[in-house]
Amino acid sequence: MKTPVIAAIVAFLSAAPVQAQSSEPEFFHGKTVRIIVGSGSGGGYDIYARLIAPYLSRVLKATAIVENQPGAGGITSLNRLYIAAPDGLTMSFANGTSAAFAQITDQPGLRFDLAKFDYLATVGAPPGLWLVGPDTT
């Protein structure tokens, strides 16, 4: 579990605005990092966000908070992220496959363009197929 957390932190730090690149510790120190999640508490990517938030807080010397914004299968939260100020302090956990499908099929209410988001990291990859033997119980 530590490897995805570390990967997310490294990716997050590397995706900060250009002005923050020269001095990440000073940039984040004392600020609030928002993690927007497109599901309610305990659902979807909320668990990942709540596991990573304390590490971000400690490493960045900032306050990392999880903000749940359920609705429209994650579209609402991605719309919010899309219009957020590009300040390096807001990120989101989203189902990329669902978001891409929503964009490709031009779902109602969609206001984001995935091509304009910065990709940080994959924090979890649930198996799409399980192979089990006949004696598995």
Image: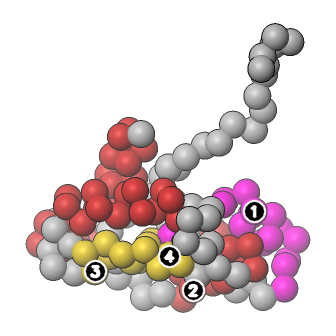
Mark 2 or mark 3: whose residue is earlier in sequence: 3
* Image side of residue 59 versus residue 100, left or right: left
* Image side of residue 7 versus residue 46, left or right: left
Residue under circle 2?
80
Q: Is residue 46 magenta?
A: no
Residue found 68% across the figure and 73% down from its top: 74
Q: What stretch of residues is rendered in magenta?
A: 92-108
Q: Position of residue 108 (x, y in %)?
A: 84, 85
Q: Residues within 10 Å of mark 4 (few under 14, many from 20)?
A: many
Residue under circle 1?
98
Residue under circle 3?
32
At label 2, the amino acid type is: Arg
Secondary structure of the residue carrying numbered label 3: strand
Q: How many marks?
A: 4
At label 4, the amino acid type is: Ile
Viewer-proximal residue among 105 and 132 = 132
At label 3, the amino acid type is: Thr
> Looking at the image, do the residues carrying marks 4 and 2 touch, with CB atoms under 8 Å apart?
yes
